[in-house]
Amino acid sequence: GKLSGISKVLRAIAKFFKGVGKARKQFKEASDLDKNQ
């Protein structure tokens, strides 16, 4: 029904934000390493 469609969308959004958070963390660590050198 309608509810399962909504939960599917929410799950996709959550996965997207988790991926973005991971990428931002890696980017921050990389730029920190850059500064230290």
Image: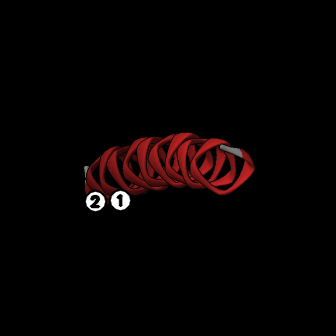
Rendered image: mark on residue 2 = 2
User: Residue 34 or 12: which is nearer the viewer?
Assistant: 34
- Number of residue marks: 2
Rendered image: mark on residue 20 = none
Is 12 on the left-hand or right-hand side of 14?
Answer: left
- Residue neighbourhood size for the residue with mark 2, other residues' Cα within 10 Å, grouped as few (<14), some (14–19), many (≥20): few
Image location of residue 16, percent across then percent down:
37, 50
User: What residue did someone put label 1 on?
Assistant: 6
> How far is disc 2 from disc 1 in space, using C-alphas?
6 Å
Determine whether label 2 and label 1 are within 8 Å by CB: yes
Q: Quadrant of residue 22?
A: top right
Q: Residue at x 57, y 49 (%)?
A: 34
Image location of residue 19, percent across then percent down:
43, 42
Q: Residue 3, relative to residue 29: is it above or below?
A: below
Image location of residue 14, percent across then percent down:
49, 50
Is 8 on the left-hand or right-hand side of 36?
Answer: left
Q: Residue at x 35, y 59 (%)?
A: 6
Q: Secondary structure at mark 2?
A: helix
- Residue neighbourhood size for the residue with mark 1, other residues' Cα within 10 Å, grouped as few (<14), some (14–19), many (≥20): few
Q: Amino acid at mark 1?
A: Ile
User: Residue 5 or 9: which is nearer the viewer?
Assistant: 9
Colour pattern of the rendering: secondary structure
Q: Amino acid at mark 2?
A: Lys
User: Residue 9 or 16: which is nearer the viewer?
Assistant: 16
Q: Residue at x 56, y 54 (%)?
A: 31
